[in-house]
Structures are given as structure tokens and as C-alpha cells.
């Protein structure tokens, strides 16, 4: 069977439309320039794709791009998050690993991005974590001293929790902690579980430098338990540019890395 050029173009467009819709689910919004760069297409082709995507009631056109009409505020569990935005997470993980120094003492949160960072660590240091997956990756690193907090295992979110184990953190001073978040809202960084938020509070108190590691899509989520206040964040590692309103959440002294 042979196809005309028009039929072939339409097939390619449908493939792009599906991928654009997937990107929207991850990010909440896309600019025309992002679409052009992602698919290596012209401005006119991107405009036609945008018009096609906007036929869906779930997508609305904005000045310079598109966005979800009702961004999904559901916070995914660990296994769902693991499939999202892999290239962006790898770039973020590089930013984490670049900051580690020989002999340092660190805390790695339960985070799919920090699991990627754990795979890259290759220097003598001590890393504490309550994440089973982070500990598993670090356990293959002969140079790294791994400290895994114990307690009851949360299967969906892949971490351990015990009040006694959290209390033991009082005896440790971290050079830097790398913390994730379920949602970033005007009041601070929130988490699905009270137990997870409790761990963050204790780690922050014991850290000289606090680094938040979270994708931009966390600004469109909602979670229940407040774990991190913006004045406590020294550095924010993310995957794309923030809006002016989002930047205003943070202190002027907070370093933004993307």
C-alpha cells in the first residue's frame, strides 16, 4: 500500500499531537517555541498542530502556546512519577551530583530525580535517606557510605518511616539536603503524607544548606501536609522557567538552577 504526501503528513501530525498531549499532562502548558524545538518543525507547522490540539476540550490556547483547561491536581505515586519527564529529570540530577564534594554528608529525599542522581554518585561521601530506591542505587557504590532510615515501609511512595529513626537525625549535621515535594503552593512545599512532611522538618533543622529538587509541574499540584517553608530554601533545582508569580514565592537570595 502506498500513501500520498498529504496522508503521510497527516500521520506524522497525529503522532506529534499524541506526544504534545503527553507533554501537556506532564507540564501543564507549552509554548509554541517549545513545540517547534521538540519536534524540529517550522512555525507554521507548530501553529497547525496547536489548532489541532485545541480541538480537545481539555486544551485551551494561550498567548504564545497552549495549556490544560483544568490542570490535573492529582499527585502521582512513585511509580507513576518515574515515567514522567525523564530527560528533564536527568538534567536536574546532574545539577545535584555536581554539588557533591568528597567527604560531604548529605540527605537524599525520596524522589525519582534523586534516584537518578544516586546512580551517578562516584565519590567518597556519606548519604542518608529514607528512600528504598535511592539506597538500592547507592548500595552499588563502593565509595559511598549509605545510611538507610528504618521503620514501616510505604509501598506506594517507596519510603520508610519511624518516629524513633527520625529522632536519630538529631545526632547528624548535613552539609546539604536535597528534598523533593508533592506540590509547590503559595504557603510552601506540601506532601501527601504527614509522616513524610515530618521527616522533611527534621532534616531541614539539621542541614546547613537546603536544596529543593522539583519539576515545574509541581506548581499545578495540590497536597495536604506542609513540610518546607520558602525562607528555608537556599536553592531550587527545577526543569523550566517559572512565571513571575512563582518566582515571588521564593526569597530573592534563593538560587534557581535549571
Image (cartoon, rainbow, N blue to C red):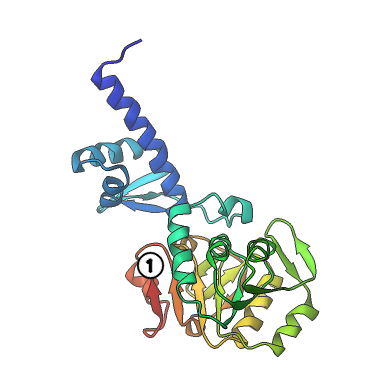
Q: Which class describes the residues within 10 Å of circle 1: few (<14), some (14-19), or many (20+)?
A: some
Residue at (68, 77) in percent of width and height:
198
Count of numbered marks:
1
Q: Closer to the camera, 62 or 208? A: 208
Q: Residue at x 63, y 73 (%)?
A: 144
Q: Quadrant of residue 148?
A: bottom right
Q: Is 30 left or right of 79, judged from the image as shown?
A: left
**Residue 142 appears in which quarter of the rendering?**
bottom right
Q: Quadrant of residue 45?
A: top left
Placement of the N terminus among the 4 image quadrants: top left
Of helix, strand and loop, which one carries label 1?
loop
From the image, which quarter does the C terminus lie in? bottom left
How far across and down, in percent of the image, does residue 214 sit?
A: 49, 66
Residue 256 vs residue 154: left or right? Answer: left
| Image location (x, y in percent) of residue 168 | 75, 84
Which of the two residues, 244 or 132, is positioned nearer the viewer here? 132
Q: Between residues 32 and 117, which one lies in front from this camera angle?
A: 117
Asked if residue 202 is positioned above or below residue 217 in the image, the reply reads below
**Residue that badge 1 annotates:** 258
Residue 157 visible in the picture: yes
**In screen coordinates, is 244 left or right of 119?**
left
Amino acid at each position: 500500500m502506498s500513501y500520498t504526501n498529504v496522508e503521510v503528513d497527516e500521520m506524522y501530525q497525529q503522532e506529534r499531537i499524541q506526544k504534545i498531549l503527553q507533554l501537556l499532562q506532564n507540564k501543564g502548558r507549552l509554548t509554541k517555541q517549545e513545540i517547534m524545538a521538540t519536534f524540529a518543525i517550522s512555525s507554521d507547522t507548530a501553529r497547525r498542530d496547536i489548532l489541532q490540539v485545541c480541538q480537545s476540550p481539555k486544551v485551551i490556547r494561550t498567548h504564545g502556546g497552549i495549556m490544560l483547561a483544568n490542570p490535573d491536581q492529582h499527585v502521582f505515586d512513585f511509580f507513576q512519577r518515574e515515567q514522567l519527564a525523564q530527560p528533564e529529570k536527568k538534567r536536574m540530577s546532574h545539577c545535584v551530583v555536581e554539588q557533591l564534594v568528597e567527604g560531604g554528608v548529605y540527605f537524599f529525599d525520596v524522589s525519582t530525580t534523586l534516584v537518578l542522581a544516586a546512580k551517578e554518585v562516584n565519590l567518597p561521601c556519606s548519604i542518608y535517606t529514607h528512600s528504598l530506591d535511592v539506597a538500592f542505587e547507592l548500595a552499588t557504590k563502593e565509595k559511598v557510605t549509605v545510611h538507610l532510615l528504618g521503620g514501616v515501609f510505604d509501598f506506594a511512595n517507596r519510603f520508610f518511616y519511624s518516629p524513633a529513626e527520625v529522632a536519630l537525625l538529631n545526632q547528624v549535621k548535613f552539609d546539604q539536603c536535597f528534598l523533593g515535594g508533592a506540590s509547590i503552593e503559595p504557603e510552601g512545599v506540601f506532601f501527601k503524607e504527614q509522616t513524610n512532611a515530618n521527616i522533611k522538618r527534621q532534616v531541614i533543622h539539621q542541614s546547613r544548606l537546603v536544596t529543593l529538587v522539583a519539576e515545574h509541574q509541581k506548581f499545578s499540584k495540590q497536597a495536604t501536609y506542609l513540610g518546607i517553608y520558602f525562607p528555608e530554601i537556599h536553592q531550587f533545582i527545577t526543569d523550566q522557567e517559572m512565571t513571575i508569580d512563582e518566582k515571588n514565592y521564593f526569597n530573592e537570595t534563593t538560587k534557581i538552577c535549571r
